[in-house]
Image (cartoon, rainbow, N blue to C red):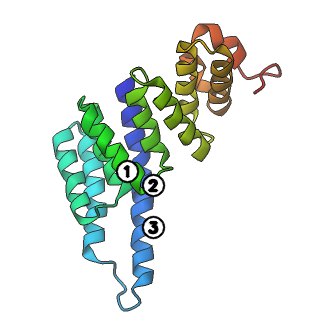
Amino acid sequence: MKHNTLLAGLIGVAAVATGVAAWAIQSRTVASSESKAPPPAYEDADALLQKGILQDQNHDPKAAARSYQRALDLEPDNKVAWFNLGVVAQEVGNTDDARAAYERSLRIDPAFPPALFNEALLFETSAPDRAVALLERATDTDPKAATAHLHLGRIWARKEDDDKAAVAFRRAVAIDPSLINEVPEEFRDSASPGPESRD
């Protein structure tokens, strides 16, 4: 389950990576009126991001990490490359490197929901208050982040704050009804969409 969540995050970011890189290339092209083509380094960084995503999808985390690191050599402030480097580290159980990579991504963009969410997963059981802070930042930035609401609910349930847990579970299920099966049994009735559900 955890691996699938991380991989889903990575796949979801594949689209983000393309969008971010395309936006960056376009803005750099516009900024340079003398040249109609973007500088090769930026094209290479985007290609390396895409290569790394494919390598990770093909279960080659070492090669993926090398591709992301090469992209960072070209663009040290690429939040998506840092994030994806963190995902690979987290997938292989290297939580210290994952946390460091997510932190680098968040220094570049403090409101980057994927990095906030995945870093929160690292703290969910060991430092739940820190995980809550990260997840709340993620949901503030992206209120439709259903899995972030779900994880908030789980943390609140473990902390025995049933009211906050119920609200978080309701929000998660309202956004993505398929998450109802992920909600603990004792909260399912209150989380189910219906006229009695309210925040």
Q: Nearer the viewer, residue 53 or 152?
A: 152
Residue assigned mark 3: 23
Residue assigned mark 2: 109
Position of 48 with respect to 106 (left or right) is left
Position of 17 with respect to 196 (left or right) is left
Residue 142 appears anywhere in the view: no
Q: Which image quadrant for residue 164?
A: top right
| Location of residue 47 with respect to 128 vertically, above or below | below
Q: Position of residue 176 (x, y in %)?
A: 61, 31
User: What amino acid is labelled 1 in the image?
Assistant: Ser
User: What amino acid is labelled 3 in the image?
Assistant: Trp
Q: Position of residue 115 (x, y in %)?
A: 42, 43
Q: Which image quadrant for residue 122?
A: top left
**SS for callout 2:** loop
Residue 105, numbered label? 1
Q: Residue furthest bottom?
A: 34
Marks 3 and 2, how far apart in space?
A: 15 Å
User: What amino acid is labelled 2 in the image?
Assistant: Asp
Residue 131, numbered label? none
Please report whichever mark, 1 or 3, sits nearer to the chain's N-terminal start: 3
Q: Please identify the quadrant where the C terminus is shown.
A: top right
